[in-house]
């Protein structure tokens, strides 16, 4: 059977790993229990998390055993990696709710039946630890001097780093040890920004259990423009259809940079590499076909074929000039709201189309905003209920972003 290590490398996931030759041989010869952690910092996973889910799918497809670790315990601390200040602390009720939402979403993609995979929550063991026992049995294996050389801590020294946050690496490392003992986990996988934390766990298990375990990171979803994939001016692209509609996700992917479309097709879809190679040959305007396939495949796998078909139809309708599609993002607003004039900039801001009034003024000055197909030329334009035709108006931002406002 094909070695999943080669699959992950060919598709562009692999960033770095410990003992590459050993790990590749292990993945080619054994069913390897592996884990990946998801800190429950929101009530939905994002498109960025979906890359991690794809890695788990590839691994499971090749016979390995995924353990999805929900960070119900570590979320109470917050990972300092890549942070310039301390994460806002969350209460237990919120964390538990978020973790359960993650469990529902991950279970749509990974088979956890009959020992094919497991879902764990580190709150089950981290919240029960005795502090003195923990620092004596686990803390003794960590050098503070070495930890301070890691970027996740070094970058915070000037701003201030609490002992609370400093303990995050120890907690995450203990997760590896716990899962090794419970499920025989021999590999932790995660994003490249987790390398320091992952090394801590990999070294801890090797020291205490005297066994060979491994760590492997994969590349973060970064666009050619240097922006994290799945981030927009209005916020993240969520897997929850109530937070990001299938149509909005489709349009986001359909509007990918030409330089990114093949890379994202390899990382975010399960299309065979031979098929992707055909799209790789497309040039000029033909590459839009590849973008459409990328968008369709991702939305289909996340939200189902019916949602993907609707999003595709809505996209074709918009490009064909039909603004009546039911799948255009829409917001219902009280008619009474428009009894007094509402400024176009305030309305666009409320709809999440712009982040600031200055952005809106710039767009209008550049001819990038239309109201029912008429260019908006005045940033101080005001809208009343009389401007709504049949109780609706459509705001267009740029060439491809539409939003319908419906009076109720």
Image: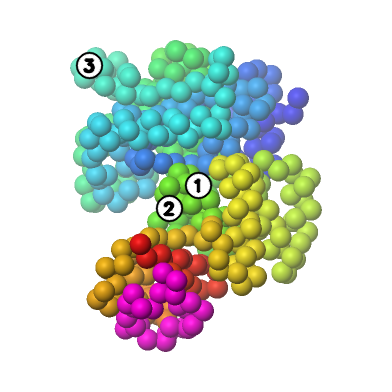
**Residue 236 circle label:** 2
Q: Nearer the viewer, residue 230 or 213?
A: 230
Q: Is residue 330 left or right of residue 23?
A: left
Q: Which mark sits nearer the N-terminus, 3 or 1?
A: 1
Q: Which residues are magenta?
A: 365-391
Q: Which mark sits nearer the N-terminus, 3 or 2?
A: 3
Which mark is in front, 3 or 1? 1
Residue 281 appears anywhere in the view? yes
Read off the residue under disc 1.
47
Read off the residue under disc 3.
130
User: Tag 3, which secondary structure?
Assistant: loop
Residue at mark 3 to residue at mark 2: CA–CA distance: 37 Å
Residue contact between numbered discs 1 and 2, judged by CB atoms under 8 Å: yes
Residue contact between numbered discs 3 and 2, judged by CB atoms under 8 Å: no
For residue 331, which quarter of the picture? bottom left
Which mark is in front, 3 or 2? 2
Residue at mark 1 to residue at mark 2: CA–CA distance: 8 Å
Vertically, is 169 above or below 372?
Answer: above
Q: Which mark sits nearer the N-terminus, 1 or 2?
A: 1
């Amino acid at each position: 059977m094909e070695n999943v290590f080669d699959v992950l490398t060919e598709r562009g996931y692999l960033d770095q790993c410990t003992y590459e030759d050993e790990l590749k041989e292990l993945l080619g010869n054994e069913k390897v229990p592996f884990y990946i952690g998801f800190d429950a910092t929101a009530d939905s996973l994002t498109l960025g998390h979906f890359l991690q889910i794809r890695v788990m799918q590839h691994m499971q497809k090749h016979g390995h055993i995924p353990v999805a670790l929900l960070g119900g315990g570590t979320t109470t601390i917050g990972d300092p990696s890549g942070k310039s200040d301390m994460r806002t602390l969350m209460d237990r009720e919120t964390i538990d709710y978020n973790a359960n939402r993650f469990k529902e979403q991950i279970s749509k993609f990974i088979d956890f039946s009959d020992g094919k995979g497991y879902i764990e929550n580190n709150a089950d063991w981290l919240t029960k630890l005795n502090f003195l026992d923990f620092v004596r049995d686990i803390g003794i294996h960590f050098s503070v001097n070495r930890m301070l050389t890691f970027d996740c801590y070094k970058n915070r020294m000037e701003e201030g780093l609490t002992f609370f946050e400093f303990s995050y690496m120890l907690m995450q490392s203990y997760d590896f040890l716990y899962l090794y003992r419970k499920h025989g986990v021999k590999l932790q996988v995660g994003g490249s920004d987790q390398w320091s934390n992952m090394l801590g766990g990999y070294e801890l298990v090797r020291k205490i259990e005297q066994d060979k375990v491994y760590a492997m990171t994969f590349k973060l979803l970064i666009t050619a423009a240097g922006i994290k994939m799945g981030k927009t001016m209005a916020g993240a692209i969520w897997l929850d259809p109530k937070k990001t509609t299938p149509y909005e996700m489709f349009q986001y992917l359909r509007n990918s940079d030409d330089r990114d479309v093949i890379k994202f097709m390899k990382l975010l879809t399960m299309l065979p590499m031979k098929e992707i190679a055909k799209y790789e040959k497309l040039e000029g305007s033909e590459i839009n076909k590849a973008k459409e396939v990328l968008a369709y495949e991702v939305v289909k796998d996340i939200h189902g074929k019916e949602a993907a078909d609707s999003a595709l139809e809505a996209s074709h309708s918009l490009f064909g000039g039909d603004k009546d599609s039911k799948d255009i993002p829409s917001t219902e607003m009280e008619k009474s709201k428009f009894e007094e004039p509402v400024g176009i900039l305030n309305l666009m801001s409320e709809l999440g189309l712009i982040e600031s009034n200055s952005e809106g003024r710039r767009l209008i000055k550049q001819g990038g905003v239309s109201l029912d197909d008429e260019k908006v030329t005045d940033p101080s334009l005001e809208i009343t209920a009389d401007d709504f035709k049949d109780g609706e108006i459509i705001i267009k931002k740029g060439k491809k972003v539409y939003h319908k406002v419906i009076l109720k």
